[in-house]
Amino acid sequence: SQKIEQNSEALNIQEGKTATLTCNYTNYSPAYLQWYRQDPGRGPVFLLLIRENEKEKRKERLKVTFDTTLKQSLFHITASQPADSATYLCALDGGGSTLGRLYFGRGTQLTVWP
Amino acid sequence: DTAVSQTPKYLVTQMGNDKSIKCEQNLGHDTMYWYKQDSKKFLKIMFSYNNKELIINETVPNRFSPKSPDKAHLNLHINSLELGDSAVYFCASSPSGSADTQYFGPGTRLTVL
């Protein structure tokens, strides 16, 4: 069956450290993978998109990697701040005829403490 | 200026009733979506419309019927509401529907009693 698994439902780190979130998938062949941030009571907000032929993408303090052999994406937040506390969702397209459909993982709730 | 808006924000109703949720986007996007987020925060796609045409129907019960009067609006009508329909429903839009960033609305929390 198809699965998208994000490691640990919750991740707690100290301010200034690097947060690393993992997204593993099974039985998908995505053309691209996206990461979203969701704050309580709000809709998800897009952060980064990485395509299957890209290994790494960066945006300010954010970095995402995509390994289609391992079927895994890593999402890093460097120099983390309490304001980074939120739930982070991994999403990928189904590939092939399901291109354009986004399938989401259950998210990792990140808490950055001072 | 709100990019993707939904009304109402909260909806509480009895089992068996029929209700609608409205969505509007002012981004000029061609594609709009409905997602359901359950109590365990699992976000799942329900429908997608591209320029008023249904392109994704992800095995959703027939009681759910989307309607797109124009490409800026996508409404969701739910008949004969059931307890299991309680969730947060998100509308989203994207420029063209393939490999695009999606822009989400604030969500509608539906509670069926």
Image (cartoon, coloured by chain):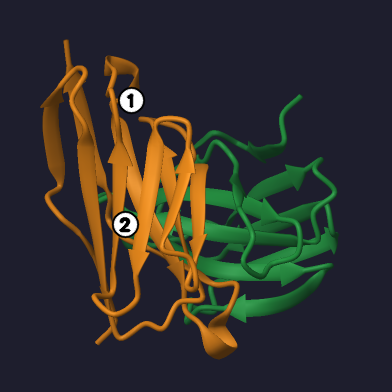
Chain colours: A orange, B green
Residue type at mark 2?
Phe
> Would you say A49 lies left or right of A28 here?
right
Indicate the secondary structure of the residue bearing disc 1: helix
Of labels 1 and 2, the one closer to you: 1
Residue at the image position 46 percent from the left and 51 percent from the top: A57
Residue at the image position 81 percent from the left and 61 percent from the top: B30
Residue at the image position 59 percent from the left and 70 percent from the top: B47
A8 relative to A110, above or below: below
Task: Assign the N terminus of chain B to one quadrant of the image.
Answer: top right
A84 relative to A109, above or below: above
- From the top left corner, tell me how far across and down residue B82 is, in percent: 38, 62
Q: Nearer the viewer, residue A92 or A77?
A: A77
- From the top left corner, tell me how far across and down residue B80 is, in percent: 49, 65
Residue type at mark 1?
Asp
Indicate the secondary structure of the residue bearing disc 2: loop
Determine the image quadrant of residue B42.
bottom left
Residue pointed to by mark 1: A84
Determine the image quadrant of residue A91.
bottom left
Give the crowd class for mark 1: few <14, some 14-19, many >=20 residues within 10 Å: some
